[in-house]
């Protein structure tokens, strides 16, 4: 999906090439424009691309395809708004807007979550299930607008010079997001940017632009002034790269692969824009023999199978203490086999399709590599093609046993529902092996021994350590990476700092 491009001049009425099966009013095969300076406009080039449902192949929409020229227009609008009307908004006024937006998102949440399910495949139970978190984020950032403050600093020159700091918005922000949770990712960028007083150009992923575009309508409905939020869908190599290198952009907030993260850092060098990166992982999830196994089995399984493994912090390297290794991996495999794979619109579905043919190829490639490397598939291991599943990109929960640390399936991010289960014996060796990855995003520890939990919490080089749980998130708790998983933090007070500059002011008093 999403890779077929067309050069035709788009019309309001561009018709689906294949009849859309979905009756969703926003994903009925119609044409979607981009949001620049408060107006819904065509791409300057007239180009557009298709977005399809990865469960069925049905066309959902054709979307105006932004590239460098559209990014230019959006940056100009965002700059004008930043220096003009938006700079006059008082913190409580930005707060009121964010709260209004939160109310609108709440009112339209079923529609927005359905769009994510249609566009990227995640089960409706999952996309609906993010409600609390998504609304919580918006309301958290609304709260932050009135909490921004500098400091009075008691310097060593009392009576001579008085000094204090001011926090100011960094300016125009380019936000580039992936497809694995489009609604949440959009809000995770727009929320703090607006709270800090920045303006934004959001570039959704080409695979799943619909919920971000619909969110753009709600942003306008909330009364956010023109140019404060611009949404320019398009491909990474064109629209994304233009945003990352644009001299009029002050900061890029990126979520996606580490390879693209590296190219964004290079592209940012021209004007030394500020960059924050939330990248991939190969996170260790560690199960000790003394763990509550009844909780650890579903916990470790869903740490990977949720969203078909398309989560940056998925606990894909499952380290299991040798004496329970066979029993535990067998139970995780049985758990995986019982999960219902299917179209995400079915409320019973637990595992949806992968997002695209590209991801299917990538994950299938790793399934073959795992077998060639000598890993043993206890569950899954093969694409599903029975009946309707043949129309989509379905891979079942897969558990590989007999995995060694040096195998590619133990080192590389697969981004599919694939667990690489690795046995371990003693703690010192475990710490070193758990850290032997270029990534450092998430990690999990399952144990009843509180001293083991604390010891690992400090020894693991990763931005999050979950003990007896996995992937728990909250708007107030910072999330982000060590090493090649990126830098900068999202959520929490640190997140606001990513969008603020510090200015020191000196007043001579003597
Ligand atoms: P990607 O990192 O290429 O795409 C993410 C976003 O970056 C999209 O909006 C894309 O259009 C944009 N982009 C791509 N190239 C760009 C460039 N040169 N300059 C600026 N923006 C650019 O990820 P992709 O290709 O969708 O997936 C490939 C692999 O990346 C996955 O299999 C997975 O391993 C990893 N990934 C990790 C994610 C995470 O949350 N950590 C999210 C998505 C992908
Ligand atoms: Mg890509």
Image (tube, rainbow, N blue to C red):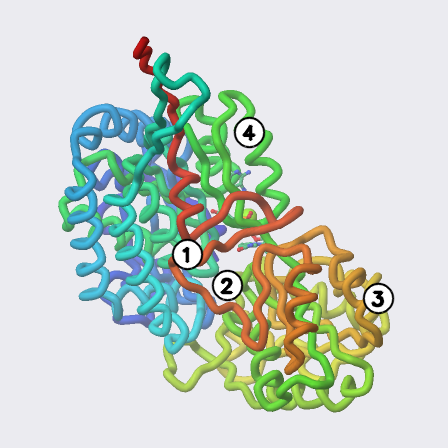
Q: Are marks 2 and 1 in contact (CB under 8 Å)?
A: yes
Provide the residue designation for mark 3: 429
- Which of disc 1 and disc 4 is earlier in sequence? 1
- For mark 4, give the secondary structure: helix
> Which of 171/289 is in front?
289
Q: Give the side of residue 184 with respect to residue 367, left or right.
A: left
The quadrant of the rendering that contains the C terminus is top left
State the residue at coordinates (33%, 11%).
508
Q: Kindly identify which residue carries mark 1.
A: 208
Q: Camera-side residue: 408 or 87?
A: 87
Q: Residues within 10 Å of mark 2 (few under 14, many from 20)?
A: many
Is residue 191 shown above or below 137? above
Residue under the image location 63 percent in, 65 percent down = 443
Badge 4 or badge 3: first in the primary sequence: 4
Q: Is mark 2 within 8 Å of ligand 1?
A: yes
Give the residue pinned by disc 2.
Answer: 355
């Amino acid at each position: 999906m999403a890779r077929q491009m067309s050069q035709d001049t788009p019309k309001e009425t561009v018709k689906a090439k294949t009849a859309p099966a979905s009756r969703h009013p926003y994903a009925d095969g119609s044409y979607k424009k981009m949001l620049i300076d408060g107006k819904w406009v065509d791409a300057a080039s007239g180009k557009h691309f298709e977005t399809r449902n990865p469960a069925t192949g049905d066309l959902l929409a054709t979307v105006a395809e932004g590239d460098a020229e559209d990014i230019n227009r959006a940056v100009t609008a965002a700059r004008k708004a930043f220096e003009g009307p938006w700079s006059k908004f008082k913190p409580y006024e930005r707060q009121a807007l964010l709260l209004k937006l939160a109310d609108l998102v709440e009112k339209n949440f079923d529609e927005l979550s359905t769009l994510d399910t249609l566009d990227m495949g995640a089960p409706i139970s999952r996309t609906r299930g993010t409600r609390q978190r998504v609304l919580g984020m918006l309301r958290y950032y609304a709260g932050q607008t009135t909490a921004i403050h500098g400091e009075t600093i008691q310097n060593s020159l009392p009576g001579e010079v008085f000094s204090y700091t001011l926090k100011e918005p960094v300016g125009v922000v380019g936000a580039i997001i992936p497809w694995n949770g489009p609604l949440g990712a959009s809000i995770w960028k727009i929320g703090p940017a607006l709270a800090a007083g920045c303006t934004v150009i959001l570039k959704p992923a080409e695979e799943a632009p619909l919920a971000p575009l619909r969110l753009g309508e709600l942003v306008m409905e909330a009364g956010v002034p023109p140019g404060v939020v611009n949404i320019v869908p398009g491909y990474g190599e064109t629209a994304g790269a233009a945003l990352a290198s644009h001299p009029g952009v002050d900061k890029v907030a990126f979520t996606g692969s580490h390879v693209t993260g590296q190219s964004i850092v290079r592209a940012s060098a021209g004007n030394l824009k500020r960059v924050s990166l939330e990248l991939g992982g190969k996170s260790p999830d560690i199960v000790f023999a003394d763990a509550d196994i009844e909780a650890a089995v579903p916990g470790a399984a869903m740490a990977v199978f949720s969203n078909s493994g398309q989560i940056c912090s998925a606990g894909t390297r499952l380290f299991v203490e040798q004496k329970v290794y066979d029993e535990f991996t067998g139970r995780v495999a049985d758990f995986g086999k019982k999960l219902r794979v299917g179209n995400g619109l079915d409320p019973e579905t637990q595992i949806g399709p992968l997002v695209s043919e590209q991801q299917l190829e990538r994950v299938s490639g790793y399934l073959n590599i795992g077998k060639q490397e000598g890993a043993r598939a206890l569950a899954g291991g093969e694409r599903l093609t029975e009946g309707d599943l043949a129309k989509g990109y379905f891979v079942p929960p897969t558990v590989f046993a007999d995995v060694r640390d040096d195998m590619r399936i133990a080192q590389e991010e697969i981004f599919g529902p694939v667990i690489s289960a690795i046995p371990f014996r003693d703690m010192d060796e475990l710490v070193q092996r758990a850290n032997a990855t270029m990534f450092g995003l998430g990690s999990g520890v399952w144990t009843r021994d509180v001293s083991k939990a604390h010891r690992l919490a400090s020894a693991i080089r990763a931005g999050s350590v979950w003990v007896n749980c996995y992937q728990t998130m909250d708007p107030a708790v910072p999330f982000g990476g060590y090493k090649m998983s990126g830098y900068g933090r999202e959520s929490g007070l640190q997140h606001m700092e990513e969008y603020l500059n510090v200015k020191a002011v000196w007043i001579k008093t003597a």
